[in-house]
Image: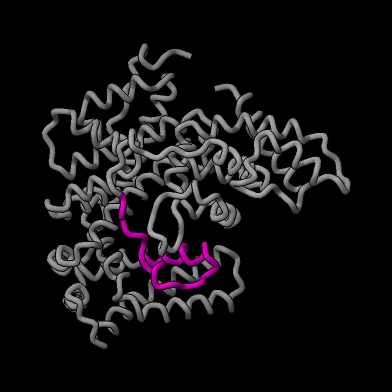
Amino acid sequence: MPDARDTDVRIGGGWAFADHPALAAHLAASCTTAAQASALSALGDEHHLRHRAAWSAVAFTPHEDDARVARTWTDLLDGDLSPRTLRSARQLAGPPVRAAFRALGRGLGLPPDLTERHVRDAEEALHAFALGAHLDVASRVVETQGPPLRALASAVPETLWPRLEACVAGRPAWQAGLDAVAATPVDASPAARLEAAADWAIARRALDALGGEEDAAADGELPGWSVVRAHHDRMRGRLRALLRTEPATLASLVPRLGALAARTDAALRRWAWAWAWREARVGFAFSLERTAATACVVERVHAPDAPSLDEAVVRTFVLSMAGRGAWTDLRRWVAGEPGRTLSTRFYRYLAQAPDTLADPGEPTARARSYEGLRAHLAAGGLAAHADTVRSVAQATRDLGPGRDLRARLHAALAPWWDAEALPLPAHHLPDFLTGLAEAAAVQTTASATPG
């Protein structure tokens, strides 16, 4: 196929970095085919339509409840925990929360009585709404002012911009985007430059996915769209997490917004849906910590100082996920797909990963993070170990049933498996062999598919 650099194909103007000609030209030159450049342009147009134009087109209508909602926000953000304030907050949050948990229960096929029990548990948890969840909702209200990334960035005080850049640059690709935009001479506001940097990082990740193993699109979606959506949502989450640390900024902004009742209702519906999914992933255990997303505690990461991972341990982890039938979810996770699209089985196995693969963090954190591992696999680690999966599947394909199957399987795995990092499989061994074979078949199919 023709090289993209030998054609007139350009990266479309849907991406925010299109105002930075050098960045757009560099990304176009990174495309290996004209079709790839065209696909990236289509993703940019879709990204602009869904994540900027659609938000800007929403018209919030003033309502007679605006003054009452403004008073509730003023009291909440000033730290007023009086019964009147808490009652008003629960009255606002109750309908969206009930609707979200009922809709999720139906979507998951839960029995109606079990769904209603989850709804009652969620309503009970709303008694703690003013202990942190209100800040998450307030940051979502800020998003309603327009395209969410720019609206959030515009609300961040100038004194917090170093922390904002650290949060956004917590992933190496995002840091590269910030650095690339900072090196261009285009005159733009800090918020606009941040939006361009975000789009630059998202587009580069989407380009990596296009034509690779993870470019399979859901029905009606463009190839690579799940990667764009996931990274945009993650970037929004980090900005909201930062803004939540500044109640005074939220207090000076949120109660003064027009059509506040409608804005608050829209923010509550998005927050309730996200909360319902967080609870669903842990079996609806209901914890105060899960009423709000995880705070941004990421420091700016410089690639030369980033800790390296033991490849033997990574290889063992990849093999374990393949044997357990989680290979497809692993690939989708590495590609950045939203967590709600992945199986609970995948997250159960991920939680069993060796401690050395988890990100450094406070021991009191409710869950370990594996962003370092994800970045490592996305940078080529998964593709490298895919060959190992094929080799192991080849070495074990003729192992038949029998009393000594465990011993024979362990002997076959020994050259590749670090038993100190993870115990060798001891149960459901035929299923483990099937998982390896299926993962290898996926790899073989992907490599045989014409580009």
Residue displayed at 88% across by 48% down? 403
Residue 45 can be seen, yes or no: no
Quadrant in the picture for residue 15 = top left
Does the magenta-highlighted stretch encompass residue 346?
Answer: no
Left or right of 415, for residue 266: left
Residue 384 can be seen, yes or no: yes
Residue displayed at 20% across by 81% down? 80
Numbered range of the magenta stretch: 271-298
Residue displayed at 18% across by 33% down? 182
Estimate the x, y position of residue 64 in percent, counting from the top left. 19, 76
Quadrant in the picture for residue 385 = top right
Estimate the x, y position of residue 56 in percent, counting from the top left. 24, 50
The residue lying furthest to the right in this view is 402
Left or right of 403, for residue 246: left
Does the magenta-highlighted stretch encompass residue 296?
Answer: yes
Estimate the x, y position of residue 392 in percent, counting from the top left. 70, 34
The residue lying toward the viewer, choosing from 76 and 374, is: 374
Left or right of 260, for residue 448: right
Residue displayed at 32% across by 22% down? 10
The way the protein has been coloured in the rendering is one colour
Figure disc tally? 0
* Quarter of the image that includes the C terminus: top right
Estimate the x, y position of residue 221 in percent, counting from the top left. 47, 41
The residue lying furthest to the front in this view is 420
The residue lying toward the viewer, choosing from 42 and 410, is: 410
